[in-house]
Image (cartoon, rainbow, N blue to C red):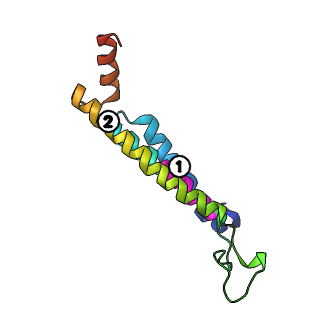
Amino acid sequence: MLGPNLFANYGEAVAIILFGIGFSNLLLQKNLIKKIIGLNIMDTAVYLYLAEKGYIDGRVAPIVTNGVQEVGAYINPVPSGLVLTGIVVSVSVTALMLSLTIRLYRRYHTLDLDEISTRLKKEGL
């Protein structure tokens, strides 16, 4: 039986499942583009998990309006800031990985990681 905690925390469960999908994709695929997609799925799972942990039902963003200055009326802004920063870094890392993948494809005419590594061994690098 799954129990009431799984249904109460379905966002965290979905994030863990997504992370597992991305991690297995990263480990099992030989194509570099598919590995990059797996890493992006893992990133998205972490951002979903942080967003789920930072959300508190009934509270609003920490912008003082209507004179409400109680701490208990607002959510913690740190998880949201971490998610936004992580998204920016993730886009940059994805762009770098894709540019390096293009360079590897132009040199070796394949995206298969095993074939690239065997060609590197033959070259003596």
User: Relative to the observer, which residue lies in front, 39 or 94?
Assistant: 94
Q: Is residue 54 above or below residue 97?
A: below
Q: Position of residue 91 (x, y in %)?
A: 42, 51
Q: Which portion, as a residue range, is magenta? A: 42-52
Q: Is residue 44 left or right of residue 30?
A: right
Under circle 2, the secondary element is helix
Q: Residue at x 77, y 76 (%)?
A: 72
**What kind of residue is marked 1?**
Phe
How packed mark 2 is, by other alpha carbons closer than 10 Å (few <14, some 14-19, many 20 or more), is some
Write down the residue under mark 1.
19
Dot in front, 1 or 2: 2
Quadrant location, the C terminus: top left
Visible in this render: residue 42?
yes
Q: Residue at x 34, y 28 (%)?
A: 113
The answer to which quarter of the image holds residue 60 is: bottom right
Q: Is residue 31 left or right of residue 27?
A: left
Q: Is residue 26 above or below residue 54?
A: above
Q: Is residue 102 above or below residue 118?
A: below
Under circle 1, the secondary element is helix
Q: Position of residue 50 (x, y in %)?
A: 61, 58
Write down the residue under mark 2.
101
Q: Position of residue 93 (x, y in %)?
A: 44, 44
User: Relative to the observer, which residue lies in front, 82 or 10?
Assistant: 82
Q: Position of residue 115 (x, y in %)?
A: 30, 23
